[in-house]
Amino acid sequence: MSNLKIFKTPLQTAQGFGDYLFEQASNKEKFNVALSGGSTPKLLFNYLAEKYAKSDIWPKVHFFWGDERCVPPNDNDSNFKTANDLLLEKIDVPNQNIHRIFGEDIPANEAIRYGQEIDKYVAKKSGLPCFDLIILGMGDDGHTASIFPNQIEILKSVNMCEVAEHPVTGQKRITFTGTVINNAQQVVFLLTGENKKEKLAEIISKTGGWQSYPAAYINPQHKEVQWFVDRAAARLVK
Ligand code: 6PG
């Protein structure tokens, strides 16, 4: 499968994807990227900061987030804080290029506001904002961004963003919908760890419970979804 790239370790996965991301951004006059959250991208952010901190491409990169926890930007749970601490503070990116989700604001209002921000800054294709690249993770329940199995209808929302709720903690989230994700020029899943192996195998082979996993419905219309994974996550893929 050409869209599945398997690396030996989480670090090598992050490095492989980091070099790919940098090369994609280097080829564009302006590059709109949406970052994923959680812990997996931390290795990616560290690698980009170590290897490319001195690069002159950053002023043309605009950073967005595919989802955010409804917490203040200085909260350790904030996806913005993670990216800012590990990467954004270490590169020459103008503040106006950082389009964080205001996790501290009323969720319903912020979902609307962020949709308007995307509409303003991201060029359209097929009548919808078309990100150059959206990075996604996948939870071990098959969720992606903050589209959880028990709120799978968010995939089909006509809006760019919706308010979601973590099924266990009840934490409110702002999330991209499937509408904006599947209109991106490129979507890449960055996945590592044993705890992803079952869901990844089921999604790739369309077996087991794959139809209940939101990550299974990420089928970007402009280019086939790509998976950058480590051997542990790919262990059950045939
Ligand atoms: C979030 C994410 C979420 C994440 C997966 C995987 O805000 O939590 O965007 O979709 O990518 O839950 O998280 P890990 O990388 O921590 O396994």
Image (cartoon, grey):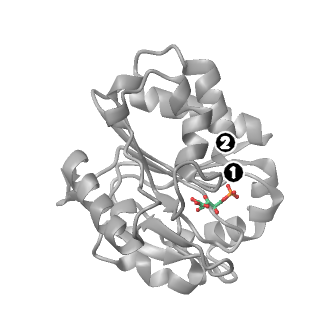
Q: What SS does tag 2 mark? A: helix
Q: Quadrant of residue 105?
A: bottom left
x 31%, y 66%: residue: 160
Q: What SS does tag 1 mark? A: loop
Image height check: is 78 above or below 133? Answer: below
**Residue 223: x and y, percent?**
39, 52
Residue annotated with mark 1: 39
Residue 41 seen in the current view: yes
Q: Quadrant of residue 182?
A: bottom left
Looking at the image, do the residues carrying marks 2 and 1 touch, with CB atoms under 8 Å apart?
yes
Q: Which disc is residue 42 wearing?
A: 2
For the C terminus, the image quarter is bottom right
The amino acid sitting under disc 1 is Ser
**Residue 81: x and y, percent?**
57, 45
x 41%, y 48%: residue: 100
x 29%, y 72%: residue: 159
x 71%, y 67%: residue: 201
Q: Residue furthest left?
A: 127
Image height check: is 167 above or below 33? Answer: below
